[in-house]
Image (cartoon, helix red, strand yellow):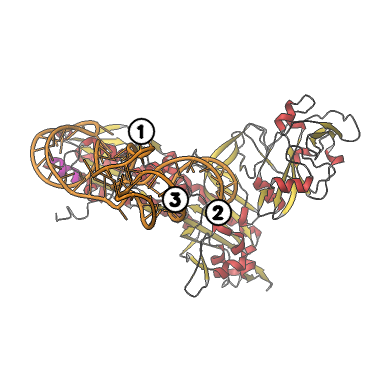
RNA sequence: CGGGCCGUAGCGCAGCCUGGUAGCGCGCCUGAAUGGGGUUCAGGAGGUCGCGGGUUCGAAUCCCGCCGGCCCGACCA
């Protein structure tokens, strides 16, 4: 026993675990509040957090699980730079595409650099040294800090500007190889999340600015999330609403009353609802909603059924556009000569007409006449409209029928914790990463890219594992597995028994913390609950008289007495069982 | 980027309208009592009132500018 009190014992009294009695004023999301209150992290700037010892312990445990599962599928770990030369991103074309999302800076000579948002470019540039198909396949990965200049950081670790991500990249000779690597990752991700106590939905997703053909997101249902996912409880279909579809009930259109659209006055009618209520109007599902959008600078009309909502992401994906925004009132008037409220596509060819699939074959529809205060009825979509492209543009709504089995779809808020992409050859071609095949032909390497946000996993676990008293970590990622609470450290026997049990657990390989603080019992109990340590052993004089200590399980509050001598052994066993 | 709000002790807040000694609770330090769910008593330390300028005899308080942060929306591999 030296001045550090038993040398290697981890004592709460000597640890930096700044718990807070009150919720921090600037935190809203549960995970944000609890991670700060329980002393796991502190904010340094908007969207930038310091991990304190407890938070770092959790983070390391999650990273360890990720490493084990990545290595299980044969991945090799790298450590790549966070600081990248602009030239690299110019070669892939993403220097422009990323826009203000990317942190950019200049060095003393004026050379342009950026902080990496992701590492496709860097890995592809390294893959240039691969020369032969015989070296493939390979999977490369790293855990690295990524930077994104989020316009609006929020919700603690859920939306930040600096964060750690595990990103891996698969390198294959052909599509079949990519499919295998993709499946390996899918299975690895399932195991990783399951070991972390999460069971995210695996959903079809839009690939957005990443490019590539197919991608799957792993989404944890949570009110703190900001992505919406449509899922079917009956058959398992699940997709991000940016991509999700649904089956629509057939609508029997009445026979048209005329062979051409008929113009009629609708004074004061400016919305779908108003037209539906208008005496001479039509129900929303019998109207054509006409929106005007600007897609990469080009104006286009976007048509949907009156009661359907547009998904801007589907529009961007379907039209192959990067920048998508609604047109201004002036632009609308310039394009169609009327203002929003009386717009229609009948007779319009010049701004391109993009129409949602749900409008195909519809007849006797009502839409704007491109003249304020007038609408057209009896519109036959196929006859009267010049549709340049039929696209799936509609945002699905909860309760609509599953496209696979017809059961009602649910739409839930979720947190994206992982995303896997089939990239193809975009980056290998841009950076010249080719190999020679059996015939000596040069082929671009087929790549996949796979990410897991470590901080988001941490926050998601808290979002799902907490109660009124604090966090309820699963053993696999808890900062400590056991806390030994010495009720009155001034009593020699109590203190010694606490240390003895601590030492025994330590010797058994358990992550254990000794709460030896000279505090009231209540303080120590509250803190242990807040921090969320899965098992608490209470050593107090009352128990010692009976030669027992108390074991309390955080998760469900289950309490039992253990004989002194067997306590460490029993607890160690319980921990081992839950560790996985 | 648009809208709303907030910066006063480590944390949570009052004071600002109506200018005049910078306060409260918790936490922290010392001592004592207590010791199974945030205990009690006594004493104490701790503040460039976000920053800069202006008005004024005098500014936490009024005015102007800036910075930072939160929430809603837009945006977002």
Q: Chain of mark 2?
A: A
Left-right relation of A168 to A479:
right
Residue drawn at (59%, 64%) of the image: A95
Q: In this rendering, is residue A83 above or below A497?
A: below
Residue drawn at (54%, 46%) of the image: A218
Q: Quadrant of the N terminus of chain A?
A: bottom left
Magenta stretch: give its range: A493-499
Q: In this rendering, is residue A141 above or below A273?
A: below
Q: Position of residue B20 (x, y in %)?
A: 27, 42
> Within 10 Å of the Cα at label 1, are there few (<14), some (14-19), or many (20+) other Cα atoms?
few
Name the foreground residue: A55 vs A482.
Answer: A55
- Describe the element under mark 3 as helix, strand or loop: helix
Residue drawn at (34%, 43%) of the image: A37
Q: In this rendering, is residue A299 above or below A245?
A: below
Residue topped by disc 2: A184
Reading the chain from its start, which is encountered first: label 3 or label 1?
Answer: 3
Q: Is label 2 on the same chain as label 3?
A: yes
Q: Chain of mark 1?
A: A
Q: Is label 2 on the same chain as label 1?
A: yes
Residue topped by disc 1: A556
């Amino acid at each position: 026993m030296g001045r550090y009190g038993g040398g290697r014992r981890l004592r709460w009294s000597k640890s930096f675990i700044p718990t807070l009695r009150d919720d921090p004023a600037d935190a809203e999301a549960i995970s944000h509040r609890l991670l700060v209150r329980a002393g796991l992290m502190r904010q340094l700037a908007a969207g930038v957090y310091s991990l304190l010892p407890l938070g770092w312990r959790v983070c390391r445990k999650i990273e360890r699980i990720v490493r084990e599962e990545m290595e299980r599928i044969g991945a090799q770990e790298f450590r790549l730079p966070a600081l990248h030369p602009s030239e690299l991103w110019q070669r892939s074309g993403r220097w422009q595409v990323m826009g203000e999302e990317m942190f950019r800076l200049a060095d003393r000579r004026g050379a342009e650099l950026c902080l990496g948002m992701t590492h496709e470019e860097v890995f592809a540039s390294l893959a240039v040294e691969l020369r032969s198909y015989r070296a493939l396949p390979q999977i490369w990965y790293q855990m690295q800090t990524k930077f994104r200049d989020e316009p609006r950081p929020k919700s603690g670790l859920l939306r930040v500007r600096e964060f750690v991500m595990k990103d891996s990249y698969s390198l294959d000779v052909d599509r079949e190889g990519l499919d295998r690597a993709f499946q390996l990752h899918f299975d690895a991700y399932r195991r990783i999340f399951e070991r972390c106590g999460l069971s995210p939905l695996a959903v079809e997703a839009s690939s957005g600015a990443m490019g590539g053909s197919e991608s799957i997101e792993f989404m944890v249902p949570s009110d703190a999330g900001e992505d919406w996912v449509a899922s079917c409880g009956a058959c398992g279909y699940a997709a991000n609403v940016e991509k999700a579809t649904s089956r629509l009930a057939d609508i029997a259109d009445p026979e048209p009353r005329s062979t051409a659209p008929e113009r009629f006055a609708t004074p004061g009618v400016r919305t779908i609802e108003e037209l539906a209520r208008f005496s001479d109007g039509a129900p929303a599902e019998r109207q054509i909603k006409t929106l005007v959008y600007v897609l990469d600078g080009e104006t286009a009309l976007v048509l949907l059924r009156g009661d359907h909502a547009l998904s801007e992401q589907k529009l961007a994906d379907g039209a192959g556009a990067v920048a998508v925004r609604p047109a201004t009132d002036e632009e609308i008037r310039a394009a169609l000569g009327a203002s929003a409220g009386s717009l229609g596509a009948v007779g319009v060819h010049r701004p391109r007409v993009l129409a949602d699939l749900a409008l195909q074959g519809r007849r006797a529809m009502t839409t704007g006449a491109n003249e304020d205060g007038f609408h057209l009825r009896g519109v036959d979509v196929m006859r009267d409209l010049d549709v340049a492209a039929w696209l799936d543009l509609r945002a699905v709504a909860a309760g609509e029928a599953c496209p696979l089995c017809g059961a009602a779809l649910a739409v839930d808020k979720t947190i994206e914790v992982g995303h896997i992409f089939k990239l193809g050859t975009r980056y290998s071609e841009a950076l010249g990463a080719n190999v020679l095949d059996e015939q000596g032909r040069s082929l671009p390497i087929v790549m996949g890219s796979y990410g897991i946000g470590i901080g988001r996993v941490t926050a998601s676990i808290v979002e799902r594992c907490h109660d009124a008293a604090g966090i309820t970590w699963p053993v696999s990622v808890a900062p400590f597995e056991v806390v030994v609470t010495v009720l009155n450290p001034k009593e020699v026997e109590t203190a010694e028994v606490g240390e003895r049990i601590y030492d025994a657990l330590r010797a058994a390989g358990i992550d254990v913390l000794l709460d030896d603080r000279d505090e009231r019992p209540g303080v120590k109990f509250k803190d242990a609950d807040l921090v969320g340590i899965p098992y608490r052993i209470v050593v107090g004089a009352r128990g010692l008289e009976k030669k027992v200590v108390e074991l309390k399980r955080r998760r469900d509050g289950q309490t039992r007495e253990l004989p002194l001598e067997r306590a460490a052994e029993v607890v160690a066993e319980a921990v081992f069982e839950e560790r996985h």
